[in-house]
Amino acid sequence: MKLQQLLSRVRKAVDDYQMIQEDDRIAIGISGGKDSLTLLYALHELRRFYPIPFQLHAVTVDLGFGNLDLEQIKALCHSFHIEYTVLSTEIAQIIFPDSNHSETANPCSLCAKMRKGALNQAMKAAECNKVAYAHHQDDVIETFLLSLIFEGRLHTFVPVTHLDKTELTVIRPLIYMGEAEVKGFVKKYNLPVVKSPCPMDGYTKREYAKGLLRQLNLENPGVKKRIFTAIQNSNLKGW
């Protein structure tokens, strides 16, 4: 996918759901993965011509596994003239208290809550009023399937969410991007993806949903687009 195509999808999402207002200071949660780096690139380019002025601040929560190399990401942010904060934590030691990283009960859920808490703290310190998450269209559908299969409810995250406790607003500008398109963009523009050091990476329920969605789409071409359209046309709050 070319940059022009990426910007077209991102701008449509931003406009459709009014994600950006004048003088917003938007934090971007940078995990080092393909999705967050694509979002960083997209918002950097968008602010160059978008009619509403906004600022960006990149934030990485270092979970404390001890092998996270962020030098290339720091260099990328520097070249984009975007402030970059790395928040060091001991979340890894809390989630996996022993040396061989044996699994605790529901580690992913606990880690996500702690990571978001640390990220919110860093964003407030940077005086940001919004945070951009790099969830793409496949994430929307996978979350919908997970809620349906394991919780028995029709639910997924929404394009814009206001967090009353922190007074932050979450925006998701990549919701019109498929995961395959993100992969293509990262490859074409040689973005410095950092492999996740988490031992649970690739072994979560989300991976199950990802595999299920892949199989459904192979057997029924276009099913991903149809499910996403159904979500948009549903009565789900926020859509």
Image: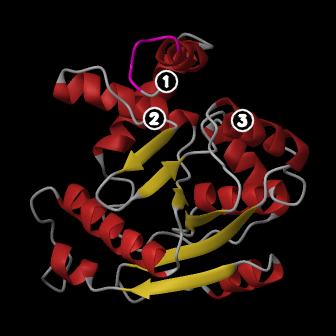
Q: Are marks 3 and 1 in contact (CB under 8 Å)?
A: no
* Label 2 vs 3, first from the N-terminus: 3
**How many callouts does the rendering have?**
3
> Is residue 236 inside the magenta stretch?
yes
Count residues near mark 1 (Cα–Cα under 10 Å), then give few for <14, some for 14-19, many for 20+: some
For marks 2 and 3, give the CA distance: 15 Å
Is the N terminus in the top left, top right, bottom left or bottom right quadrant? top right
Count residues near mark 2 (Cα–Cα under 10 Å), then give few for <14, some for 14-19, many for 20+: some
For marks 3 and 1, give the CA distance: 14 Å
Q: Do the residues labelled 1 and 2 touch (CB within 8 Å)?
A: yes
Q: What residue type is labelled 2?
A: Val
Secondary structure beneath label 2 = loop
Q: Mark 1 points at which residue?
A: 239
Q: Name the residue under label 3.
A: 15
Give residue 119's position: percent from left, percent from top. 40, 71
Corner quadrant of residue 102: bottom left
Count residues near mark 3 (Cα–Cα under 10 Å), then give few for <14, some for 14-19, many for 20+: few
* Label 1 vs 2, first from the N-terminus: 2
Q: What residue type is labelled 3?
A: Asp
Name which residue lies at 70% across and 72% down: 192
> Is residue 209 inside the magenta stretch?
no
For marks 1 and 2, give the CA distance: 6 Å
Q: Is residue 135 above or below residue 117?
A: above
Residue most extreme to the left: 105
